[in-house]
Image (cartoon, rainbow, N blue to C red):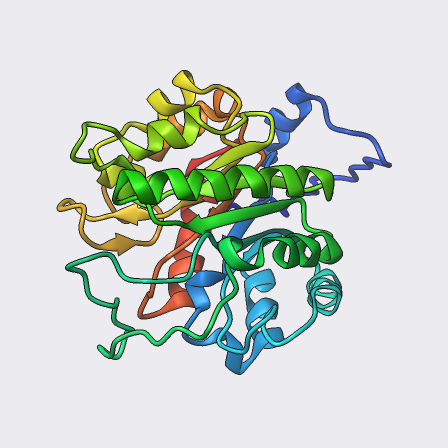
Amino acid sequence: MNFSRRKFLQSTGTLVLSGAVLSGKAASYLNVVKHPVGVQLFTFFNTMDADVKGTLSKIAAAGYKEIESAFSKKGGYYGMKPKEFKTMTNNLGLTWKSHHVLGAPFKLPAGTKMPTTPDGKPMVLPPMLNLQDNMQQLVDEAADGGVKYLVCANTPTSTMEELKASIAVLNKTADAATKAGLTFAYHNHDMEFRILKDGVIPYDLLLSETDPKKMKMELDLAWAVKAGKNPVDLFKQNPGRFPLWHVKDLDAERENILPVGSGTIDFKPIFAAASVAGMKSFFVEHDMPKDAFGSINSSIQYINKNINV
């Protein structure tokens, strides 16, 4: 998720845009990126808590304008209350757009191991609230922080029983979020596209058994591609339901996450379908990178140079 669209005014003379909105023609002429580039803070999961303000300052300096928060080892919002975190981000020129929460108490899927950190050690997760047990608190906190979107980052979908229970929680949360003035969304990995024993594809039910007016989708482009899906097809099948995206790249084997533009995903046709998707914001993300700042800098440079949405 990145662009250098802050070159809002690049003058060869004097350009005055006093409060006016650029027309599409003018925006094209000036090569202005219409959507600010955002970053998902899970990219910095292993380092951010040691220096929250410093991390956010570097993110802003790299050209990012929007952020999506995630999980903190300090608890809460990187050790702060929602309004405190909002004030810090705003003071740094960042817009806190969205927040990730778990759908249920975290547990590893059967047969899988905890992901490792860049130093090779198993990742250690702090106790975290979840929608199954703490839904109203999480909704209220997000509303208090003034974010636009509350996103379920992950929920059990490996059996029909899990899937049905998860959908019930998602529908309940969607109702509560709507009442609180939030837009609720669901973020995918590849597991939601794996066919269950009875032939059901979880993602299909997540779309059909929830209210499209109350629950949107945050499509993680790379996880969808890894699952063998074409994001553009998903957009066409469910137009307007994907206001949020996660943008990261994959190697040829679809195994390793890479900075945007350094892998094998062709992002141009995906971004060309942004209006079909209903995309409003997108966030660059790199899960457990060895060099988080190197990754987000490389990503935003690629987006600024190659993608204009």
Give 255 or 133, whichever is nearer the viewer: 133
User: Is 60 or 84 nearer to us in this picture?
Assistant: 84
Q: Position of residue 224 (x, y in %)?
A: 30, 37
Image point (26%, 42%), residue name: 159
* Above or below, comparing residue 131 to residue 243 in the picture: below
Name the one closer to the observer, 26 or 265. 265
User: Where does residue 121 sit, x and y in percent of width and height?
Assistant: 24, 79
In this picture, residue 198 sits left or right of residue 41: left
Q: Is residue 218 above or below residue 62?
A: above
**Compared with residue 184, is residue 62 higher up or lower down, i.e. above or below?**
below
Question: Which residue is pictured at 31% across the width and 74% down the height?
Answer: 123
**Residue 229 versus residue 59: which sits nearer the camera?**
229
> Is 92 on the left-hand or right-hand side of 121?
right
In the rendered image, residue 156, in percent from the top left (x then y), is placed at 34, 49
Total labels: the figure holds 0
Determine if residue 253 is in view.
yes
Residue farthest to the bottom? 50
Q: Is residue 46 left or right of residue 171?
A: left
Question: Visible in this render: residue 222?
Answer: no
For the point 86% across and 36% down, which residue is it? Answer: 18
Who's the residue at 25% across and 71% down the image?
116
Picture quadrant of residue 20: top right
Q: In the drawing, does residue 192 fall left or right of residue 153?
A: left
